[in-house]
């Protein structure tokens, strides 16, 4: 079964998160810089004596698809790596995928996301 895990969290948590996921065998991932707000609705900053509402906060979004590593293990490790206990720690979303295709080979399903062990030709 293919499962996509999407983790949105603080930018400074990217390296600990990548290391924690790599340590349990999650190697493939996509990382994006994103902006958003949750329950805290952003924050207020003072610049040159004026107060500004900053309602979109910079975050990172890490996406990965897993089939061999148990999803519960991914969730447990990710939470441990990014949790500070403060508002703004982020969210994790889990999606069931119906299929995936490795464009280069045409492999589908689990085979499309599993590491084949071969080095890509450059």
Image (spheres, rainbow, N blue to C red):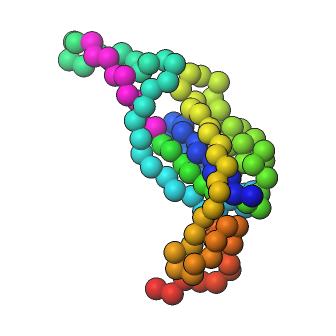
- Answer with the quarter of the image where residue 82 lies: top right
Give whichever of 68, 90 is nearer the camera.
68
Left or right of 10 in this view: 17: right
Visible residue check, residue 16: no
- Which residue is at a point 49% across and 52% down the rendered structure image? 31
Please tell me whether residue 57 belongs to the stretch shown in magenta: yes
Q: Is residue 29 above or below residue 32?
A: below
Quick one: which residue is furthest to the front in this view? 98
Query: In the image as oriented, which residue stretches furthest toward the bottom?
Result: 121
Residue at image coords 64%, 46%: 95
- Residue 73: x percent and y percent? 78, 47
Q: Position of residue 122 (x, y in %)?
A: 46, 85
Rendered view: 96 above or below 25: above
Residue 71 in view: yes
Lateral position of residue 49 relative to residue 116, left or right: left
Q: Quadrant of residue 107?
A: bottom right
Left or right of 20 on screen, residue 12: left
**Total numbered circles:** 0
**What residue is drawn where x is 69% and y is 57%?**
2
Q: Which residues are magenta?
A: 51-59
Position of the N terminus by quadrant: bottom right
For the residue pair 39 and 13, the one nearer the viewer reads as 39
User: Main structural element of the magenta stretch: helix, strand or loop?
Assistant: strand
Q: Position of residue 54 (x, y in %)?
A: 34, 22
Magenta stretch encompasses residue 79: no
Q: Position of residue 41 (x, y in %)?
A: 44, 18
Q: Nearer the viewer, residue 70 or 53?
A: 70
Q: Residue at x 54, y 48 (%)?
A: 62
């Amino acid at each position: 079964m293919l499962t996509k895990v999407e983790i949105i969290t603080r930018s400074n948590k990217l390296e600990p998160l990548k290391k924690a996921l790599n340590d349990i065998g999650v190697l493939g991932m996509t990382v994006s810089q994103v902006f958003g707000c949750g329950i805290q609705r952003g924050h207020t900053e003072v610049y040159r004596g004026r107060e500004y509402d900053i309602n979109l906060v910079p975050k990172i979004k890490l996406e990965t698809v897993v089939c061999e590593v148990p999803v519960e293990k991914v969730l447990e490790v990710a939470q441990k790596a990014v949790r500070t206990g403060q508002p703004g720690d982020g969210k994790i979303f889990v999606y069931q995928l119906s299929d995936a295709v490795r464009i280069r080979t045409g492999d589908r399903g689990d085979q499309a996301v599993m590491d084949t062990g071969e080095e890509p030709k450059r």
